[in-house]
Image (cartoon, grey):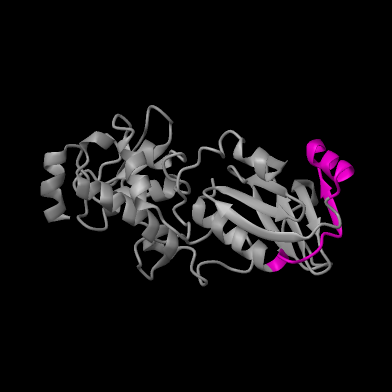
Amino acid sequence: MPEGDTIFRAARTLHRALSGQTVTSFETVFPRLSRVETDSGITGRQIVSVESRGKWLLMNFSGDLILLTHMLMNGSWHIYRPGERWKRSHADMRVLISTPAIIAVAFNIQIAEFHTADSLRRRPGFNRLGPSVLADQYDQSQILANLTAHPDLEVGVALLNQSVLAGVGNVYKSEICFACGVNPFRTMESLSVEELGCLVVTARKFLLANVTETSGDGISTYMGMRRTTRRADPEERLWAYHRRAEPCRKCGTPIESRKHSSDARTSFWCPRCQPLSRAAAAKASARC
């Protein structure tokens, strides 16, 4: 599933390409969206802005109309010039928005809804989003409060809870835990103040590093070469994620992986650098 950095880059590219432009045509395979075009008209409206909130993307039109989309596992937004050949099949098109200069196409998106500002505030799953990791104003104190409000949750589960903090996905969850020396299967109540602070700061640090102007290409849903290690070799770009049985980049111990029972998502960790007990973690921090 695309994580917060992917959606942020998609929104940024769409905003630069579309903001201020007038919609000349609108197509979709979703009947509910088609009905809005018929009843209220998308064509003729101006695209005011495009923004991301966690893993959600919002396209704001004039006249208090918002297109809310979520990419889930396989969705993506592309932008093209009129007449340019698409990089995906027309059969995968779900939403198409044309302006005089740009065609924006949503491929394989399963969630696409029109909202007003009022209905968006009441939309389940969106109205309870926690602070966004990539928001201009990163609310560390609120995220810390949200994390400590779930003492029984495993760390790896808490970091994926979008009502706690919005934007972290499975890749970053394992990478954040590794960088902080925290075993993802520890409970939130077992963490020290320093460990909690590290998780919050590192989440912001890692995602920001992957939304720089050079972190993606011209296509709006770039998903390659996510990096947390700062190493130049593409084969060494991640610390733990998808590296089961490979040597830890710090101590050489084979990386382990296991699914969390509550959400069936897999975490990757180094058993030496990220021991399960708090006491062992204190010792490990001096070694790894």
Horizontal and vertical percent position of residue 244: 34, 45
Q: Residue at x 43, y 38 (%)?
A: 161
Picture quarter containing residue 150?
top left
Q: Nearer the viewer, residue 82 or 117?
A: 117
Q: Position of residue 28 (x, y in %)?
A: 81, 45
Q: Which image quarter: residue 82?
A: bottom right
Q: Nearer the viewer, residue 150 or 269?
A: 150
Side of 192 relative to 111 (left or right) = left
**Visible residue check, residue 76:** yes
Q: Position of residue 251 (x, y in %)?
A: 19, 55
- Look at the image and say whether residue 23 sits in the magenta stretch: yes
Q: Please state, as top left, top right, bottom left or bottom right, where the N terminus lies in the image.
A: top right
On screen, 153 above or below 175?
above
Residue segment shown in magenta? 17-41
Q: Is residue 3 magenta?
A: no
The residue that appears at 60% across and 56% down in the rendered structure is 51
**Does residue 246 appear in the picture of this structure?**
no
Q: Is residue 137 left or right of residue 91?
A: left
For residue 180, side relative to residue 41 (left or right): left
Residue 259's place in the image compared with 203, above or below, is: above
Quarter holding residue 155: top left
Give x and y (percent) for residue 102.
Answer: 77, 66
Horizontal placement of 229 versus 76: left or right? left
Q: Where 196 falls versus 265 (above or below)?
A: below
Which quarter of the rendered picture does the C terminus lie within?
bottom left
At 22% from the left and 45% from the top, the residue drawn is 274
**At 32% from the left edge and 45% from the top edge, which residue is drawn?**
144
